Image: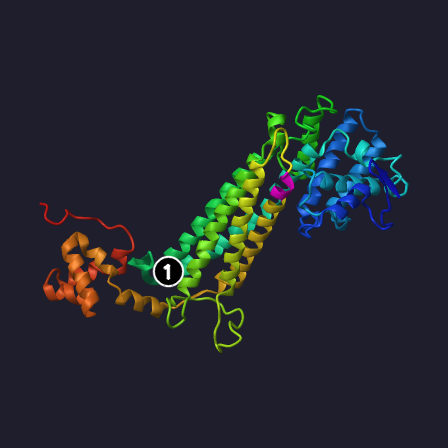
Amino acid sequence: MEHDLLGDMEIPADAWYGIQTQRALDNFSITGVPISHFPQLVNALAMVKAAAARANTELGLLRAAKADAIVAACEQICAGHLHDQFVVDLIQGGAGTSTNMNANEVIANLALEKLGHRKGEYAYLHPNDDVNRSQSTNDAYPTAASLAIIMAADPLIDTIFSLTQAFAAKGTEFADVVKMGRTQLQDAVPMTLGQEFEAFAVTLNEDVDRLREACTLLSEVNLGGTAIGTGINTHPHYSALAIGHLSKISGKPLTPASNLVEATSDMGAFVLFSGILRRFAIKLGKIANDLRLLSSGPRTGFGEIRLPPMQPGSSIMPGKVNPVIPEAVNQSAYQVIANDLAVTLAAEAGQLQLNAMEPLIIYNLLNSMKMLGAACTMLEHRCIRGIEADVERCAQHLNNSIGCITALVPHIGYANSSRIAAQALHTGATVRELVLAEGLLDEAKLELLLSPQSMLAPQPQHSPIGLA
């Protein structure tokens, strides 16, 4: 039996949490996703509590025996112990109070055991008075959330970088495969398949740096601000000490926010981070679209690349194989984009000195990171690495296209080029045949201008047509 301001309640004997966690379990059944779904958040909460205990001990606010038990409990949690006891739904009322109390209660009961007491004997070590000393949910929770995102960013960045390397490797492999580039789904000018894949690598790799920059902004935390940023119920030196310990424990260079009142209500760093995830998701989704187009057919579409077959594609059409991996990536991207909208709305909904919608922000950020990491890994290992080029199909499209006429504009003029292009479309003759037939260029010059080496990169230019 445990007691709080609302009365008494029975707690399961095998539970390590307490009455406030139990009330949250009864109240919030929204997503079915508990705190334990994101190990970084559980570990970050434990790190915050350990840092607070060390700072409080140094300031003479917490007996060393209690602090040692709390720190030992937190270290055990960071090692993976009792994660299944972090049971509160990520979406909750109370601006994260239920999450904070879930951590306080589990840590308190684990620490009590280390001191030789039974779970729930809070007279010896209390979830609020000891584990939560010098803290409020309003500084402990966002600090833990920021730290969790920073820690989750490390494997995501590694995953993104690995994917970009896979694209770059295909860029090298396909460096000599000449094909038609396209704009607005129409023939444009020649390029190589290698250039196309290298561009995929570059655009995704840009966001690695953006994520690192956003983590720097998240590293400014409001620990020590307590309820609204004024630091009520803390020692003047507590904030700096606690954040210093948290930096050592986590291995992340955290710093105190310059204005704790502002930092307690502002969600700007989370919004920025979410925006970068959205930007990456948009790029990733666009690439998935391109892969589906380039592999379409295989006989009646573009068919310029072959994706590795993953599973039969139809319950009725024999032999059909669908681009299921890019399709799953597309859907992941859509969800991340939707998550960003939820983050935006929740951040705007803050009122006065606190944002009560912060749990939704944290849930969506961690969920987006998890989805993007999984999508990138899937795309790399089950698609990109196994892509093959259909060299003959690429050459066929190139030879049948009139896009190469663009290379002749500086030499025969735009008007002649337009006329030749229209004639080629109407008659089915090639640009090469028509230019030679009209004697606009000799064969040697035409061969040089229409060679891949001339069309795939900038070339020295002569005076425009009609000018001396």
Residue drawn 72% across and 32% down? 136
State the image quarter where residue 390 is shown.
bottom left
The x and y percentages for residue 115 are 88, 39
Q: Is 274 on the left or on the right of 239, as rendered?
A: left
x then y, percent, for residue 81: 77, 49
Which residue is nearer to you in this view: 156 or 316? 316
The image's colouring method is rainbow
Looking at this view, is 264 or 161 the one in front? Answer: 264
**Against 233, is 185 above or below?**
below
Q: Is residue 430 left or right of residue 31?
A: left
Considering the whole magenta stretch, tell me its main secondary structure. helix
* Residue 170 seen from this side: no
In the image, the segment drawn in magenta is: 357-362
Residue 297: % across, % down: 40, 70
Q: Name the residue carrying label 1.
A: 193
Residue at the (15%, 60%) spot, across then down: 419
Residue shown at 85% from the left, 51% from the top: 14
Q: Is residue 255 shown above or below 79?
A: above
Quadrant in which the N terminus is drawn: top right
The three-letter amino acid code for the residue at tag 1 is Leu
